Amino acid sequence: MSFKIGIMQGRLSKPIDGKIQSFPKDHWKNEFYLGKQIGFELIEWVLDEDLENNPILNKRNFSEITNLKNETGIDVNSICCDYFMKNSLSPHSQSFKKENLKIFEFLIEESCPKNNIKILELPLTGKDGLKNKEIADDYRNLFSRVEKKLIASNMIIALETDLDPDEFGFFLKNVNTKAIKVNYDTGNSAVWEYNVKEEFLSYGQCVSNVHIKDCTPKDYTVKLGDGNVNFDEVFQLLKKSNYKENFILQAARGKDDFQTAKDQFNFVQLYISKYLQ
């Protein structure tokens, strides 16, 4: 089986305001062509707080996105919804506002179906994350309301959380896992020092997307291979879980964005070849 390797949007452009990740408003089109040169087959779209300049929220731009995908052969299969980290969908959060729900609904009803995007990735960590019981209950209710719509559109929501393996497994038992799955982030698990085997025992069958990065509890993101992630173990467990989906590079930046991305692509390809093909 041929696994697709993608890169997080913005990693092939200069950082904006020193941020490691943001929507590259002036260079998003060019990233498709740069990605093609390296060999990427996917770009994971980024939705951050720059809503005004993000074409994924404007129906007039959808044809341009389609043309770029067709011309370069690079698909967009997922959206990383960083926006909802600071603009919660839970009424029990201080950052909640009704506008957040409208954006969420637009993504499910317009952006994803019309751009053939299958995964809406929600990073739910920290004070607005699922460790808060009231917030967790709000998200369960929200997911229950939209699950039929997701399934009808052949879409899923992939959760990235800071729940430990048991907590995350328990949360997933109370949602419809045909519609709600897991975005597994290799680096986050290293930061929180979670046991990888326990993670996969708890929810390995629900993993629908994998972010590749390397971290330590001290340094949030480091060069692939320099942190605490045991990539051999991760890929062995992915094989055991019969993982058949994509890999998205969300790794540390380097001095040369293009060369760094190329090195990271080769790094992941090596592990895919070793364990999954």
Image (cartoon, grey):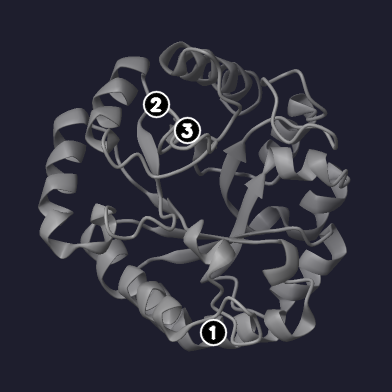
Mark 1: give few (<14), some (14-19) or many (20+) Cα within 10 Å: some
Indicate the position of residue 125 as horizontal and vertical percent values: 70, 61
Quarter-wise, where is residue 119 in the image?
bottom left
* Label 1 or label 3, whichever comes before in sequence order: 3
Q: In front: 120, or 3?
A: 120
Residue named by callout 1:
142
Indicate the position of residue 219 as horizontal and vertical percent values: 78, 31
Which quarter of the rendered picture does the C terminus lie within?
Answer: top right
Q: In front: 135, or 229?
A: 135
Q: Residue at x 61, y 80 (%)?
A: 139
Q: From the viewer's perspective, is 221 left or right of 100?
A: right
Q: In front: 215, or 219?
A: 219
Task: Give the secondary structure at mark 3.
Answer: loop
Indicate the position of residue 71 as horizontal and vertical percent values: 14, 32
- Structural distance between the alpha carbons of marks 2 and 1: 34 Å
Residue named by callout 2:
12
Residue named by callout 3:
3
- Examine the rendered structure and indicate whether residue 13 appears above or below residue 174: above
The reply to whether discs 2 and 3 touch (Cβ–Cβ < 8 Å) is no
| Of the two numbered discs 2 and 3 in the rendering, the one whose residue sits closer to the viewer | 2
- Structural distance between the alpha carbons of marks 2 and 3: 21 Å
In the rendered structure, which amino acid carries the disc numbered 2?
Answer: Leu
